[in-house]
Image (cartoon, helix red, strand yellow):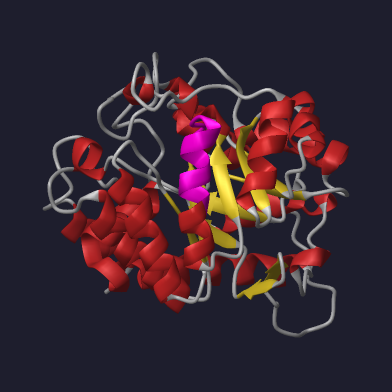
Amino acid sequence: MTYEEVLDQARTCIGKYCKACPVCNGRACSNQMPGPGAKGTGTVAIRNYEKWQELCINMDTICENRPADTSLSIFGQTFQYPIFAAPIGAMKLHYGDKYDDLEYNDILVSACAAEGIAAFTGDGTNPAVMEGAAHAIRAVKGQGIPTVKPWDLATLQEKFALVKESGAFAAAMDIDAAGLPFLKGLTPPAGSKTVEELKEVVAAAGVPFIVKGIMTVKGARKAKEAGASAIVVSNHGGRVLDQCPSTAEVLPEIADAVGSEMKILVDGGIRSGVDIFKALALGADAVLIGRPFVTAVYGGAAEGVHALVQKLALELADTMAMCGAHSLDEITRDMIR
């Protein structure tokens, strides 16, 4: 299947909210929640996408002629590309009846592993979601990153036991998920964490821990103080707070502040291999991509994931070659403007 064919097929089965647009830029879904839209005015997801498009690439082909190496090494693992599938949950609520969370994670985790990358898996109030994610990750020898909500410590310890059973090489928390309307007032409670509370969480995880939902230098330094091995610069696709900046706008200052001390990942509106190149040039080590992986799974399951990943990979390698970057480490900020 081509990626266009994947999108065509997704439109037949993805529910009434997502339109499986040719480019997922936040405009068609706007503030549609339930659905894939953003909170309030719905403009943050749009801003995420548009700020990447405002950046331009500096071409330079007076360089050695050899293939670009797109591989990424992180936490003792080597991946073929600096791409991770972002955690997404409540599939039936937001994307129709074709898949529940367990079915979606099962397809996504195995398909990503087959492409030489890894998926972050979602979490929810139903314990079976985390149990299913752990099972899917265990089936691919730990090549996945289970992601927990900011629950109370007792609940998190139960979930971290599943992380250990899965053999996952890392774990994550989307610390900003307390802002999701669907989690407010639920049991167990999900909420903000102090640095001291987050230290307890990091210690309980038992594997390199990634804090997702960082949008300021101050927040990045707090995550580092708590012992996080990495952060994800993320505004949750605009779904937790309206009127906040795009990830592209805050990434450089965060990378400058803590990039030499921890791994920096970023998400939010990244839709092409060119966008991935821009993110790495601004200081990220890798990217997370969310909604396009949903349409890939709905449109073609493992074959859809293959089509998406290969599209992104070819675009990234081509951009690297045209800028004289032969490895990810050679992508520098002066290659964009």
The vertical placement of 195 against 25, above or below, is above
Residue at 46 percent of width and 56 percent of height:
162
Q: How many marks?
A: 0
Write down the region rendered in magenta: 149-160
214 and 53: which is toward the camera: 214
Q: Is residue 157 magenta?
A: yes
Outermost bottom residue: 66
What is the x, y in percent for residue 122? 40, 47
Q: Provide the major secondary structure of the magenta segment.
A: helix
Q: Is residue 81 left or right of residue 254?
A: left
What is the x, y in percent for residue 272? 51, 55
Residue 108 in view (yes/no): yes
The vertical placement of 151 against 63, above or below, is above
The vertical placement of 163 against 180, above or below, is below
Quarter of the image that includes the C terminus: top right
Residue at 68 percent of width and 37 percent of height:
200
What is the x, y in percent for residue 251? 72, 37
> Where on the picture, by quarter, is residue 176?
top right
Quarter of the image that includes the N terminus: bottom left
What is the x, y in percent for residue 11? 17, 51
Q: Is residue 252 left or right of residue 19?
A: right
Q: Is residue 184 left or right of residue 166?
A: left
Residue 22 in view (yes/no): no
Residue at 49 percent of width and 33 percent of height:
236
The vertical placement of 198 against 264, above or below, is above
> Where on the picture, by quarter, is residue 25?
top left
3 and 93: which is toward the camera: 93
> Where on the picture, by quarter, is residue 53?
top right
Q: Is residue 221 left or right of residue 19?
A: right
Q: Is residue 190 magenta?
A: no
299 and 132: which is toward the camera: 132
